[in-house]
């Protein structure tokens, strides 16, 4: 399984902090994102944002990063700390 | 002095004066200390130019990644400048107007190294550390997420 | 907030934590505070590369001109960046290793303004404010005047 | 009279903090510097340093600045505060 986390406005839009996704057939983060987006219009909209950021195992990453069973992937809007 | 990096991601407040004392303690080889403190402003520039009073700022973070992102940024700074100590504190949770949000402190034998490293850390923290701000105006129930500014992304280009 | 500039040229020590509190007091419009503190180092790089322990630093100044030079530098910074408060303290007289020499604090609504103004003030202070350092090594009777560094003059070119 | 001040290494070399100089016949700081330098080898050496800085009435100045009776002129080595 892949643990998927959502933060900030994304967490609010999706009304959840995390989901578990079966890693079978998923090679990279784009495929994971596409599979999640298939779950409905809210998912499509939230994950379709071209500002969407992603972290793989708590490191900022790109959408073409390879994922494996057991990975932690987080989607979030651009950060605004400091 | 060997490099010392100290990172805290915490809900509690902090005292910049006490942080200064820790940066200086047994560190007389470094003559330069640079510090930056970010506080919750009580006015936020609205998209339409109007100003709204901010009663509470809610800071969300990505536990685990927040600490490692700040540590990475501190290490990058220490690789570029001869630093003695680097201290970064970032708070999360609800914060009232005027409260401290972030502290960055650097020490060096050279003033420009300390100042540049402090500015570098703030610039990277703004664009790379997983924190998100939501402003809740006085009297409002719902808050609004602060939009990332392109000027913050642009700030990285100078380094 | 109207600009507030506060300059002190003094023999007494100062407390950076208390200075931070003064910069922040009734100033929640400015979310950014940048500070620089310069301390007496206990080792001074000698001309020949050897290191000598500095017991006392003797700081001479030009009374009257010191205050007006620092005020001019603060005003120049405020003309370039949107600053709320500028605080500069510079000490004179004998200072022991580890003691504070100089404090520069700036507040702004913008972090880069606060940080750039703080660095700008330090750069101009180093080359334009009438203070002179004499290092007196442990056990020595006579001190030696610190030589001005060309890197300090060069630092002005970036502004 | 023109009040002339010396600081730091210059003050030590000249073994004095200040002198008063009659302004008669002096137009600019260079002339003042030359008149002082005539007082002996120590003066010549101290004031001949090409790093010498000058302030006129407590403002950094250049050697060709015009001076008048009542002015305060200070000579000193490059500053090293901060």
Image (spheres, coloured by chain):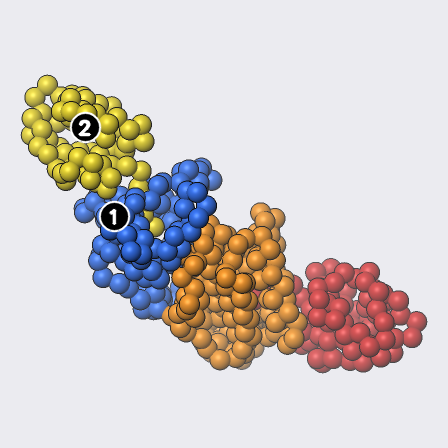
Chain colours: A red, B orange, C blue, D yellow
Label 1 chain ID: C
Crowdedness near tag 2: few (<14), some (14–19) or many (≥20) residues, C-alpha within 10 Å: some
Question: Which secondary structure, mark 1?
Answer: loop
- Residue depicted at x 23% and y 42%: D8
Q: Residue at x 23, y 30 (%)?
A: D46
| Relative image position of residue C59 (x, y in whole percent) | 26, 51
Q: How many marks?
A: 2
Give the side of residue A49 with respect to residue C151, left or right.
Answer: right
Q: Position of residue D5 (x, y in %)?
A: 16, 37
A12 vs B122, nearest the viewer: B122
Of C100 and A10, the residue lying toward us: C100
Please rate how many residues cluster around mark 1, counting C-alpha atoms within 10 Å: few if below 14, some from 14 to 19, many from 20.
few
Judge whether D17 appears above or below B40 on screen: above
Q: Is residue C3 visible?
A: no
Of the two numbered discs 2 and 1 in the rendering, the one whose residue sits closer to the viewer = 1
Kindly identify which chain the residue marked by label 2 belongs to.
Answer: D
Residue A59 picture location, percent across and down: 71, 66
User: Relative to the observer, which residue lies in front, D47 or C43?
Assistant: C43
| D33 relative to A7 in the view: left or right | left
The residue to which callout 2 is attached is D43
Q: Is residue B29 visible?
A: yes
Toward the top, the furthest residue is D25
Query: What residue sits 22% from the left and 58% below the top?
Result: C11
Which numbered disc covers residue C142? 1
Position of residue A5 measured from the top left corner of the image (x, y, whole percent): 73, 76
Contact (Cβ within 8 Å) of mark 2 with mark 1: no
Q: Is residue D65 above or below residue B134?
A: above
Is residue C85 found left or right of A74 in the rendered image?
left
Q: Nearer the viewer, residue B147 or A22?
A: A22
- The CA distance from mark 2 to mark 1 is 22 Å
Disc 2, SS: helix
């Amino acid at each position: 399984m892949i643990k998927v986390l959502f933060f900030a406005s994304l967490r609010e839009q999706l009304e959840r902090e995390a989901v578990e996704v079966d890693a079978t057939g998923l090679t990279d983060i784009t495929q994971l994102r596409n599979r999640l987006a298939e779950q409905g219009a809210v998912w499509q909209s939230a994950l379709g944002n071209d500002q969407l950021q992603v972290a793989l195992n708590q490191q900022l990453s790109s959408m073409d990063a390879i994922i494996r069973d057991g990975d932690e992937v987080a989607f979030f809007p651009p950060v605004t700390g400091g | 002095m060997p490099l010392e990096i100290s990172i805290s991601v915490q809900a509690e407040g902090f005292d910049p004066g006490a942080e200064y004392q820790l940066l200086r303690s047994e560190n007389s080889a470094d003559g330069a200390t640079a510090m930056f403190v970010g506080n919750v402003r009580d006015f936020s520039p609205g998209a339409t130019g109007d100003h709204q009073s901010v009663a509470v700022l809610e800071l969300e973070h990505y536990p685990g990644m927040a600490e490692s992102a700040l540590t990475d940024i501190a290490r990058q700074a220490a690789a570029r400048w001869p630093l003695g100590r680097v201290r970064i504190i970032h708070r999360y949770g609800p914060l009232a107007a005027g409260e401290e949000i972030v502290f960055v402190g650097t020490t060096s034998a050279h003033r420009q190294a300390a100042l540049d490293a402090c500015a570098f850390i703030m610039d990277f923290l703004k664009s790379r550390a997983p924190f998100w701000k939501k402003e809740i105006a006085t009297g409002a129930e719902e808050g609004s997420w602060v939009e990332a500014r392109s000027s913050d992304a642009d700030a990285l280009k100078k380094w």
